[in-house]
Amino acid sequence: MAHTVPDIKHKNWSSQWLFIMAATGSAVGLGNIWKFPYITGENGGGAFVLLYLACILLLGVPVMMTEIMLGRKGGLSPINSMRKLVGIAKASPLWTTIGWSGLLAGVMILSFYSVIAGWALAYIPMMATGTFTGIDAEGSSELFGALIADPWRLILWHSIFMLMTMLVIARGMEKGLERAISILLPGLFLLLLALVGYAYVATDQFGRALSFLFNPDFDALLYTQNADGQTIFNLEGILSALGLAFFSLSLGMGSIMVYGAYLPKESSIGEATISIVIADTLVAILAGLAIFPIVFSYGLDIGAGPGLVFVTLPIAFGNMGGGVIFGTLFFVLLVFAAWTSAFSLLEPVVAWLVESKRFSRPNAVWLSGGIIWLVGLLNVLSFNVLESFHPLSFLGEFKLAQQNIFGILDYMTSNVMLPLGGLAMALFAAWVLPSAIVSKEFNLPEGCVTYRTWSFLIHYVTPIGVGLIFLKSVGLI
Ligand code: TRP
């Protein structure tokens, strides 16, 4: 028997503006402030940024429009929205896999996202009490090492972050999500601007940061040195640009779809998409402009990798005037950004439990949050006790064989589930859903330029672009 689509009507966002804020809050997160600067640093700057911007524009924009459109047409959690759309299009129920894989990806991502957000939480009191004052490189990496080596500390902060997220979602749309977002998002922008201002005033390296971000040096992107010091050609940077674009825009999982489900019918999807994408990109660039001048002015390693904001940056804060205050603010900023993203990782599961399993909203939150918290413990242990436990080592040559649990969850979501999810949404909207329905949902006539541009990108550019990059990244071509 085919599953029935629950007959539930969710509350809508109070306005299009609140949807834009919530979706921007979802997009702006660790991806922008933690990942973007360190991945840009590792890939040599400007050329990578250019590629990232191209991925955002050519792939991110049409996929985001698509995801919002599917959500609004469905009006339900990603699983049930897809069920409904499959019914409308008389398509194969296999397309509901988009919803299921998104639900799973949400659980997987939030389980490690919360652990990393927990690091940022742990850094707030450390910064505020001057732990880093006068510190050198060795001292800073010891402090970070001591944090991640201690499962109990990590569990504490991971639990606090999960609770913070669950409390907001349990309170529902208006009292929970909307209220939190309308405080946190403006707060986030103010903090970020203050930090950029600080980097401008307190260092003389702002110009160098600008040219690092905007002066493309393609050699730095395409060539790296191997272990023997030889220069080798390397496409990894291109793959990272796409993965980061999807991750940063929250695409391919259902976060944006479920937020789209609560969008009032008369709102313009195109306009909303453009605002969200501009805000998300701006935050990534501003985060670079807050971080790079400080890293440069202390001659620190810009290619330090994931430790850039947790090891490298605190060295500088520990030695600059005003470093205690601005260092603390930086980690508050990181927590705000991660928090508003976590809402959107939890919401799809919660909405599905409410619709299909008839849970009350708070019960749905406790159950799903509890499970995610438990999976999170495996991620906590991946940084210490289980650091070299490689559950997939039987895969031999394959990349996943040498990863611990955190590595597997990160790789599978960013490199496999999100690109495939986004690709499947694009294929469904382009080739399965009748174009009359699509253009109506967009409130755009089929002949107009915006619709035709979207249609061209989603029929051809997205499948080819995402498909090629995906096949390459899993080593199939
Ligand atoms: N976009 C967020 C960030 O940049 C993370 C995030 C929230 C996300 N929801 C998502 C990533 C859905 C992928 C899919 O940190």
Image (spheres, rainbow, N blue to C red):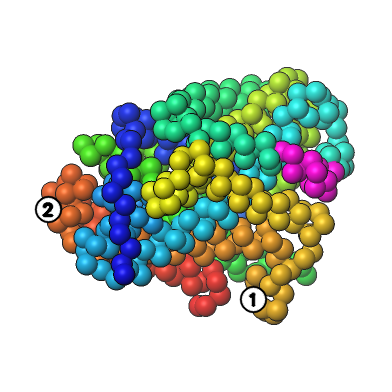
Instruction: Assign a secondary structure to mark 1.
Output: loop
Which residue is denoted by mark 2 in the rendering?
447
The answer to whether residue 320 is above or below residue 234 is: above
Residue 132 is tagged as none
Distance of label 2 from label 1 (alpha carbons): 47 Å
Place of residue 150 in the rendered image (x, y in percent of width and height, measured from the top left): 83, 46
Q: Is residue 314 left or right of residue 164?
A: right
Q: Nearer the viewer, mark 2 or mark 1?
A: 1
Numbered range of the magenta stretch: 144-157
Amino acid type assigned to the residue bearing label 1 in the image: Phe
Q: Residue at x 45, y 41 (%)?
A: 360
Q: Is residue 323 left or right of residue 16?
A: right
Residue 434 in which image quadrant: bottom left
Residue 326 in which image quadrant: top right
Let me know if residue 466 appears in the view: no
Place of residue 394 in the rendered image (x, y in percent of width and height, measured from the top left): 70, 79
Categorize mark 1 by other alpha carbons within 10 Å: few (<14), some (14-19), many (20+): few
Examine the structure image and report whether residue 465 is included in the region drawn in magenta.
no
Q: Is residue 280 left or right of residue 125?
A: left
The answer to whether residue 410 is above or below residue 173 is: below
User: Which quadrant, please, contains the N terminus?
Assistant: bottom left
Categorize mark 2 by other alpha carbons within 10 Å: few (<14), some (14-19), many (20+): few
Which residue is denoted by mark 1 in the rendering?
398
476 or 170, nearer to the observer: 170
Examine the structure image and report whether residue 148 is included in the region drawn in magenta.
yes
Amino acid type assigned to the residue bearing label 2 in the image: Gly
Q: Residue at x 41, y 28 (%)?
A: 174
Q: Residue at x 30, y 56 (%)?
A: 5
Majority secondary structure of magenta residues: helix
Place of residue 368 in the rendered image (x, y in percent of width and height, measured from the top left): 55, 48
